[in-house]
Image: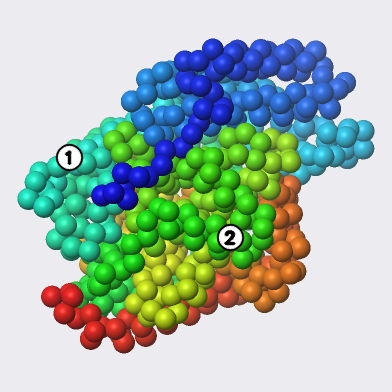
Amino acid sequence: MAVQEALPHWDLTPFFPGPESPELQSALETVRADTASLRELVDAGGLDSDFDAVIEQLNELLERHALLEAYLFGEVSVDSRNDAAQARLSELMQESVGMSNLQTRITAWLGAADADELLARSEQAREHEYAVRRAQIVAQHLMSQAEEDLAAELSLSGSTAWGKLHGDVTSRLMVTLELEGEERRLPMSEARNLATNPDRDVRRRAYEAELEVWEQSAVPLAAAINSVKGATNVLSARRKWGSALDQALFGNAIDRETLDAMLEAVRESLPDYRRYFHAKAHSLGIERLAWYDVFAPLPGEGRVWSYDDAREFIVEQFGTYSDRMREYAERAFRENWIDAEPREGKRDGAFCMPVRGDESRILANYTPAYYGVSTLAHELGHGYHNVNLASRTEIQKRTPMTLAETASIFCETIVREGALQEAEGSPAEQLEILEGSLQEAAGVCVDILSRFQFESGLLEGRARRELSVTELCELMLEAQREAYGDGLDGDALHPYMWAMKPHYYFSSFYNFPYTFGLLFGLGLYARYESDPDELRAGYDDLLSSTGLADAATLASRFGIDIRSPEFWRSSLDVIRAEIDRYCASATDSAGDSAHLRR
């Protein structure tokens, strides 16, 4: 308990003193004035006569807006009951409609422009060539300006509002559970953290109590997901995309050939992941894993990683890559960039968001096990990516999710390899680290595959009509059974994952980019192991360029062909080797730990 009490909260005061401060109100007024000024410039023919000025002003407006949005989202993420922050965030979203409409006008103009002529005469166009070329493609999928304006305005009371409802509802959920003979009410984030409890009965009861709370909240969440996906289908069709998936692929800077190659390799790997699930079940002394066993610790006392231990170890391991990466991590901890304590009103899960310049803020719900260390390293990797993007303009920083996971996976792998090396004299500790690594890999490959299949089925079904709570749960269970196979008990899955995951409510096909990021990051780490100096020479520049080219172009810098299943198989081979090692170690240690399982 002492570890939990010591966990830090992030510091947002370097940006604004508070959501009701004069400084924040002034910043809101500046965004409003800058939007009006840019609109006047565009109305006056600035796109034809002074394109450079338009792009310069747009970048400045986007930068100011990004700071306000990050600050206010940060406030409500750790306390959804902060009414002042909620009100200011709503006010900012109203202003964002005007920005969105202006960007649509600029995109439509670029679609009709001679790009080569524009690039020849405009310095800003040359600096943003990739964005210009992509805008010409997007312009082919725009509705009329009036329809785009209306869609942006209605999104505030439509899909954006439904997504906000999901966040507000789920962050306030409380789970009632008996622990140590005492009935307690826990925030959902704390109840979900009990999935790592060594007592299987505690895990089971927490899982059952969690499902009961999701069931009680399912009706409004089903209305939300139906509304969000209904809007996605309508707008994708009106914008003449072949499907919502085609639009998502373009947004993630990859093509269908790349996705198919990756998913082919992942599906081939499913029997290997099931070997891991079976080996873990054997170690736990059970016939088959239930959903609530997936994150269970292995038998034995497992190392307790205090937050201070995690901080020191991450800084040390980042230093094995470079002084720059180590100094960045030291700064993130020193300046309180991280909010680590689970508490009522705080969102579940973890994320990293850029705020201003090279500064980020990281939300985590820290648990004192290797999994908690790994999650911190992952999110700090996102922050390191943001450091490398800091010199770019806001338009140049726009990184697709496929490439946004590159640094996080790379940093997570650095820490894992360091932990395995440090634990060489302790097979049990090495097994625990491998367990954490394979939990992550299984989640990003197997569970993400189930989520991808669920969303594909949801969008297909939603094109005909709304889906009921029962249908959503059945669709989720069907996807999980297909992905996990006999690796998990088919009668103890999680039918409400559609209600829990916030990504469904804010974007379409958020899922496959995580798989891409894991396997691409592992591929880069393999290059690092084979030639550290060559990887270092180009890695930071790669991170700074993720908004300047598509994924295939950037991957080719390191000789990677992402359209070939062979690349994805080679990355999965790294995971297969870990599974082989895990299965052998789990079998060897089974006899020694049998008494702990009884």
Asked whether 177 or 402 is in front, the reply is 177
Q: Find the residue positioned furthest to the left.
A: 181
Could you say which quadrant of the image residue 493 lies in?
Answer: bottom left
Residue at (43, 58) in percent of width and height? 309
Could you say which quadrant of the image residue 516 lies in?
Answer: bottom right
Q: Is residue 317 above or below residue 213?
A: below
Give the label on residue 185, or none.
Answer: 1
Q: Is residue 398 visible?
A: no
- Classify mark 2: residues with Cα within 10 Å, few (<14), some (14-19) or many (20+): many
Q: Is residue 427 above or below residue 119?
A: below
Label 1 vs label 2, nearer the camera = 2
Q: Is residue 330 above or below residue 37?
A: below
Instruction: Residue under label 2, please give it.
Output: 318
Q: Amino acid at mark 1?
A: Arg
Residue at (41, 29) in percent of width and height? 76
Residue 23 percent across, percent down from the top left: 57, 16
Q: Amino acid at mark 2?
A: Phe
